[in-house]
Image: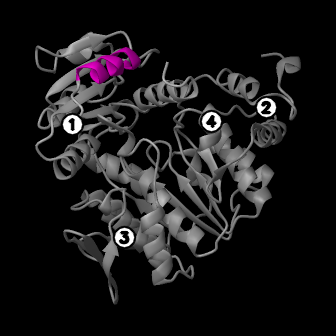
Amino acid sequence: MSKHNIPQATSSLPMWLDYLENIHTSAIDLGLDRVEVVADKANLRKPAQTIITVAGTNGKGSTCSIMEAILLDAGYKVGVYSSPHLIRYNERVRIDGQVLPDQRHSQAFAFVEEQRGETSLSFFEFGTLAALKLFQEESVDVVLLEVGLGGRLDATNIVHHDVSIITSLAVDHVDWLGDDIEVIGYEKAGIFRSDKPAICGQPEAPASVAAHADDIGAKLYQVGYQFQYQEHIESWDWYCGAFDMKNLPKPSLPLPNAATALTALGVSGLEITDVNVVNGLKNAKLAGRMQKVSGSPVTILDVAHNPHSAGYLAEQLQKQYPNKRIHCVLGMLKDKDIEATISVLKEVVSFWYLGSLEGPRAATADELKQYTPSDAQVFGSPTFAYKEALITAAKDDIIIVAGSFYTVAEILVYLQLQRSSGGK
């Protein structure tokens, strides 16, 4: 792209995003050499006093949201960087629970563009550096960084962070991380730092995680050993060494992630009271995770897109809606483990509505149908599938929309349009 086509600080955010999607050779380009050069030049390696980096196959967003809610209740100014977004790019950067206007992102992109010179950056690398700049400008107290892919070679790993978290470990992103769980464990553990706390919320984690922590002298806190939790019908307890908290309120987000979040905050050195923890657990929420969007029939949006997250979704549906008929609107990407994901959901789903996604990674509804019961219905998009589910489902049934961030995003947009047009 010629120099005169480079957007300016005053250019629109869509113009910047279009530019960023086309300036690098590939959308995913793991490695730290290029992004480190720019981060050092721009002084972005430590954008806040306390930084917590979160890796994991599933649960990164939930863990960050729980920590965010607790920290906000404690009076800290908190920045969160997450991906992907559901509807708007702005969702990727939150400061004190709020997204920033387009103009701030454009200004941050212009800064990174100026700093990078001839260094080529991928879309995610560019966005990560811009987020760090925004956190620095806002003088946040705590930054919560969600790893994009893997850990060791992810752009977020350039930061000098204080606490590392692995939420869960499962085979996903096979094209980039492989299908060996020990290798995946090593890649995720690549965010660990010497003499710093490293939290692992995956029960019976692969040996590579503890081995890497030991090799570099990280202080490992492994669930089941250094910290534990126990669920009760109406509450739960958390234990970490000499510390424990009992009769905690159950969050709307997964309990394993809540326990991992509490452990990370507990060893962070930040000042947090029991009241902050209780309030944060009550307030934490995240779009697209067991998100209820309508009442008759109940529609639940969940971005579950692999066997691990589908298992959690199925478990929650059985707990919260026993003996209900479940209608599933499903759209997936073809690089996911479609067969195993559907196999898990089969345990709870009675009716299937399969929608084709768009784009080079998209799976068609016909490709999904190979793994569903023969009476599954096929549609050109998740929206058409959802419309049919609404017609077919009885008032007391449950509709779930799952399989991908793209699927959930499409239905969220559809529902917003319905509300703005008065349901016409």
Q: Earlier in the sequence, mark 4 or mark 2?
A: 4
Task: Residue type at mark 2: give it.
Answer: Glu
Residue where numbered disc 2 is placed: 118
Of mark 3 and mark 4, the one earlier in the sequence is 4
Distance CA(mark 4)–CA(mark 1): 35 Å
Residue to which mark 4 is pinned? 89
- Mark 1 vs mark 3: which is more N-terminal? 3
> How many numbered marks does the figure carry?
4
Q: Say which mark, if any, is on residue 166.
A: none
> Which residue is located at x 74 percent, y 34 percent?
119
Which residue range is magenta in the image?
382-392
**Callout 1 environment at 10 Å: few (<14), some (14 to 19), or many (20+)?**
few
| C-alpha span from label 2 to label 1 | 59 Å
Q: Give me the disc on residue 214.
A: 3
Query: Which residue type carries mark 1?
Result: Asp
Residue 339 higher or lower than 94, as above or below:
above
Could you say which is closer to the camera, residue 112 or residue 305? 305
Mark 1 falls on what kind of element? loop
At label 4, the amino acid type is Tyr
Q: Nearer the viewer, mark 4 or mark 2?
A: 4
Q: Which residue is mark 1?
A: 396
Of the residues shown, which amino acid type is indicated by label 3?
A: Asp
Secondary structure beneath dot 4 equals helix
- Whole-Å distance between the Cαs marked 1 and 3? 53 Å
